[in-house]
């Protein structure tokens, strides 16, 4: 099964993708993770990615498409894929059609997580992660059980993404409305779109997604 998770940054796509990886053995193709890895590598490509990410912009379609192709080619043919953060534009949606067709794959569902912008700003600006294992936390909703100590690995080092600020979040929301939301009619015409209230609890959103894709 191949699905797309749609929603603005911070809507919970990554969290829900992780559940699908655990429950269904699917592979999460997160462009955000791929781009951060490229950035961390410090290559010329990584430096270009860093400049774009820090400005709150989007990298070129060519770079993203290449990342997606490489990931799919490294997966078993029978392993399902979760596209998280891709496609973002109509051009990428058409590219994905070709990328999947070239590999004998089809798209099963497009699941959109709908969110409230003000609530989303609050959710994103308060989040931080363990610098060691990547466990996620939030200033108000999920603090470590022991102050300053990661629940998962015991590390005392934490970090925040430099682009997790209100100005960047609202810029990305506007970007999502202008560029990504318009791709929904493409998939609506195919009967693939399912919409979920992304402001529900994580467990409630997970249950709705699993009901859509037919968890046994």
Image (cartoon, rainbow, N blue to C red):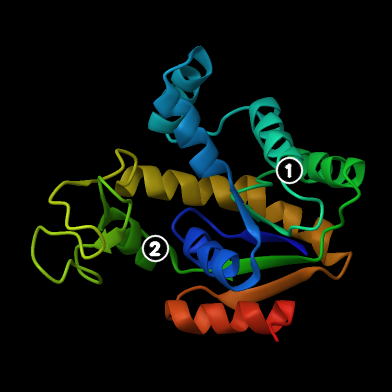
Q: Residue at x 74, y 36 (%)?
A: 69
Quadrant assignment for the N terminus: bottom right
Quadrant assignment for the C terminus: bottom right
Neighbourhood count class around disc 1 (C-alpha, 10 Å): few under 14, some 14–19, many 20 upward = some
Q: Residue at x 87, y 53 (%)?
A: 105
Vertical placement of residue 167 versus 26, above or below: above
Neighbourhood count class around disc 2 (C-alpha, 10 Å): few under 14, some 14–19, many 20 upward = many
Q: Residue at x 73, y 43 (%)?
A: 72
Vertical placement of residue 36 versus 113, above or below: above
Q: Look at the numbered disc 2 and give the secondary structure of its residue.
A: helix
Where residue 193 sits, quadrant-wise, is: bottom right
Residue 72: mark: 1
Where residue 3 sits, quadrant-wise, is: bottom right
Please indicate whether residue 67 sits to the left or right of residue 152 in the image.
right
Front in this rendered view, residue 16 or 12:
16
Residue found at the far top of this picture: 44
Badge nearest the viewer, 1 or 2: 1
- Give me the C-alpha separation between circle 1 and circle 2: 31 Å
The location of residue 84, given as percent across then percent down, is 60, 53
Residue 210: mark: none
Callout 1 touching callout 2 (CB < 8 Å): no
Label 2 sits on residue? 120
Between disc 1 and disc 2, whose residue precedes? 1
Please indicate whether residue 11 sits to the left or right of residue 20 in the image.
left
Where residue 60 sits, quadrant-wise, is: top right
The location of residue 197, given as percent across then percent down, is 54, 77
Front in this rendered view, residue 82 or 181:
82
The location of residue 42, given as percent across then percent down, is 42, 19
């Amino acid at each position: 099964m191949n699905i797309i998770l749609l929603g603005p940054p911070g809507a919970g796509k990554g969290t829900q993708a992780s559940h699908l990886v655990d429950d269904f053995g699917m592979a999460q193709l997160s462009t955000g993770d791929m781009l951060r890895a490229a950035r961390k590598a410090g290559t010329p490509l990584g430096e270009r990615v860093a400049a774009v990410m820090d400005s709150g912009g989007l990298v070129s379609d060519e770079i993203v498409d290449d990342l997606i192709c490489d990931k799919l080619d490294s997966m078993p043919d029978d392993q399902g894929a979760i596209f998280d953060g891709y496609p973002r534009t109509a051009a990428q949606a058409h590219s994905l059609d070709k990328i999947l067709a070239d590999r004998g794959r089809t798209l099963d569902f497009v699941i959109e997580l709908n969110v409230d912008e003000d609530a989303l700003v609050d959710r994103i600006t308060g989040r931080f992660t363990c610098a060691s294992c990547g466990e996620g936390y939030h200033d108000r909703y999920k603090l470590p059980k022991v102050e300053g100590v990661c629940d998962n690995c015991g590390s005392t080092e934490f970090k925040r993404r430099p682009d997790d600020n209100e100005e960047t979040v609202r810029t990305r929301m506007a970007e999502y409305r202008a560029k990504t939301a318009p791709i929904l009619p493409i998939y609506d015409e195919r009967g693939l779109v399912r919409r979920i209230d992304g402001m529900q609890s994580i467990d409630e959103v997970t249950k709705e997604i699993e009901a859509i894709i037919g968890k046994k």
